[in-house]
Amino acid sequence: MSATAPDLDHLRQWIGREDEDEDIAAVRHARLMAATIARPGPALEAGDALPPLWHWIYFLEGAPAAELGRDGHPARGGFLPPVPLSNRMWAGGRVEFDAPVPLGAPMRKHSRILSVDAKLGRSGPLVFVTVRHEVFTNGARCIAEEHDIVYRDPPPPGGGAPAAGESPEPGAHRRAVEPDTTLLFRYSALTFNGHRIHYDLDYCRRVEGYANLVIHGPLVATLLAGFAQELGGKPLRRFEYRAVKPAILGTTLTLEANREGGRVDAWCRLGEGGVSMRASALLAP
């Protein structure tokens, strides 16, 4: 656990840092994703539109094991600032879909650190880093995204489980998902995500303070985005999501949503109570 508050002036020296990457929207990788989340419908083919948020399975960072931190992520202090708080999580984000990404197309991604901020939460200091990503195909921007990352220390030993939190009325549309270790393994493999909270139970409990393996935040967001698009019957124009509470393996995830016109409000309810993630989607005209 960190002994002092993070040096925000030092961390803000990372604001403005940029990164470029290239990839191809490979059909095989998309089909593996479809199998991982049991996506219904015919097999994806070249030229089909990449489903919403599936760009997260591309542009994978392949740092050698010697360059990874204790948590399994690339060691801090490269593109992302060296925040000295042990737990790193997806806090939320805002994604605009300007145009479809055709499967099989070459892609280019430009990333930039937008902000580094801190505040004091109930469990101690929190540091928020926001990164802007833009994805281009054939010279045209297809996706513009602002991704919020939060860093914090683990709860103290014996701190107990977090409160259930908000519990909205049931949505008009609902779907239950039962995650298991195979789903977590496959999604980690598809995204080349080495974060140990998704597969190393001893590390998860002893270092980051979770009761069980953690279900990936981006996986939950992807399920909600797909649910919203299926419900709306149209491609998404914009998708916003905010993590409320970690989803821990062993609980049922219930995707719930209400649609009003061209907007879909969705959330992921946890079996033991409370909401893991809230989201809203705007449909294409």
Image (spheres, rainbow, N blue to C red):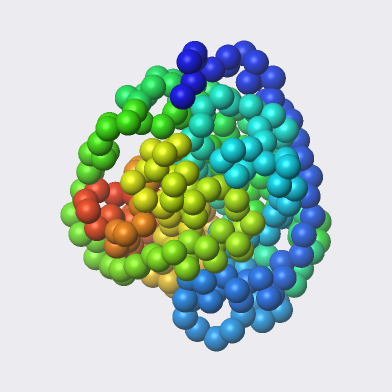
Residue depicted at x 63% and y 38%: 69
Q: Is residue 90 left or right of residue 137?
A: left
Residue 158 image position (x, y, % from top left) = 27, 32
Q: In this view, does 28 lie to the left or right of 270?
A: right
Q: In the depicted view, which residue is nearer to us: 246 or 68?
A: 68
Residue depicted at x 42% and y 60%: 224
Q: Is residue 67 left or right of residue 247?
A: right
Q: Can residue 55 be seen in this view?
A: no
Image-quadrant location for residue 146: top right
Q: Is residue 142 above or below residue 88?
A: below
Residue 166 image position (x, y, % from top left) = 23, 43
Residue depicted at x 55% and y 86%: 42
Q: In the depicted view, which residue is nearer to us: 219 or 213?
A: 213
Q: Is residue 61 left or right of residue 271?
A: right
Residue 240 image position (x, y, % from top left) = 46, 48
Q: Is residue 205 above or below residue 256?
A: above
Residue depicted at x 77% and y 59%: 23
The number of numbered discs placed on residues in the rendered structure image is 0
Residue 77 image position (x, y, % from top left) = 69, 29
Q: Can residue 164 be seen in this view?
A: yes
Q: Is residue 201 above or below residue 38?
A: above
